[in-house]
Each structure stands twice: as structure tokens, then as C-alpha cells.
Image (cartoon, rainbow, N blue to C red):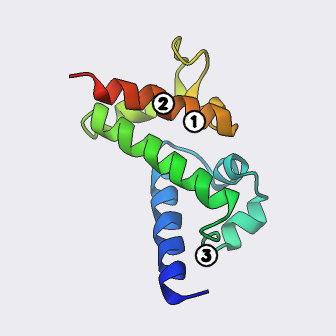
Amino acid sequence: MGRQSVDRQMVVARAYRSAYKDFGLTDAKAAAILGETHTRFTLSQGFSLSSKEHEIQVLFIHLYQSLYAILGGDKAAMKHWFSTSNKHLRGIPMQLVTRITGLAEINAYLDAMRAKV
């Protein structure tokens, strides 16, 4: 594995950590989103760029960035949105992100919201 791959893994891992911490999630919950054990997740320096875990991290970061843009960076509002039932998504985003389909649906919803002018 080349140095550039390791750097990308680390950047994604740091961005994921920052995003889930801003949403008030624990390391254990962040590991569960990735389908990993808490121990493996906390010991990891980042996941392979071709792994499922890496793809999920990127989707979660996209969710965070979209919500950040929509709410103007208001982290309290972002945390509230993430932990509150959403009738359009038919669930609580914090719970929906534990499934890849839920994460994809949230991203599609937020992308549509961002497209509105």
C-alpha cells in the first residue's frame, strides 16, 4: 500500500471521526454504523480505500457536509436534525444510518434539499 493511500485513509478517518463526534455519537455507535466491532474500529488507522467501511465513511461525511451547507454550519441544529424523527425519511436519521440503504436515502434527500434554490 502506497503512502498516498495511507494518507487518504487517514484523512477520511479523521473527517469521519469529526462528523460523528459533532452529531454526538460515541465510538461504539460509529463502529456499528460501519459494521465493525468497537475494538477494531478504535484500533484502526483507517480502512482500505476499496473497503465497504471506507465507502460508508465517505457516505457519512457527505451527509455531514450536506447538512452543514443546508443549516449554515449550525452544529446544534445539525445534531437536533440528526436525532429527531423526519417524516420524509420515515425515521430518525441517527437510526437510519445503521443501514447502507438508510444512509443512501438520507444523502439523496439532502442532495435534493440542497438543489432547491
Element on which disc 1 rests? helix
Would you say 69 lies left or right of 84 here?
A: left
Check disc 2 and report the residue beneath it. Answer: 108
Query: Does the rendering let one see residue 30?
Result: yes
Task: Examine the image and state in which quarter residue 105 appears.
Answer: top right
Say whether marks 1 and 2 touch (CB < 8 Å): yes
Check disc 3 and report the residue beneath it. Answer: 45
Query: Above or below — where is 7 with respect to 104?
Result: below
Mark 1 and mark 3: Cα distance apart in space: 25 Å
Q: Rate crowding at label 1 as few (under 14), some (14 to 19) or many (20 or more) other CA atoms within 10 Å.
A: some
Q: Nearer the viewer, residue 20 or 116?
A: 116
Element on which disc 3 rests? loop
Outermost residue, top side: 87
**Which numbered disc flags the more N-terminal residue, 1 or 3?**
3
Query: Above or below — where is 64 with respect to 40?
Result: above
> The N terminus appears in which quarter of the rendering?
bottom right
Q: Rate crowding at label 3 as few (under 14), some (14 to 19) or many (20 or more) other CA atoms within 10 Å.
A: some
Position in image of residue 54 (x %, y %): 61, 60
Q: Nearer the viewer, residue 51 or 96?
A: 51
Mark 2 and mark 3: Cα distance apart in space: 29 Å
**Which numbered disc flags the more N-terminal residue, 2 or 3?**
3
Outermost residue, left side: 117
* Mark sitting on residue 104: 1
Kindly identify the amino acid type of the residue bearing the numbered disc 1.
Ala
Q: Nearer the viewer, mark 1 or mark 3?
A: 1
Task: Examine the image and state in which quarter residue 74 appears.
Answer: top left
Could you tell me which residue is drawn at 47 percent across and 83 percent down? 4
Kindly identify the amino acid type of the residue bearing the numbered disc 3.
Gln
Element on which disc 2 rests? helix
Would you say 32 lies left or right of 82 here?
A: right
Could you tell me which residue is drawn at 61 percent across and 51 percent down? 56
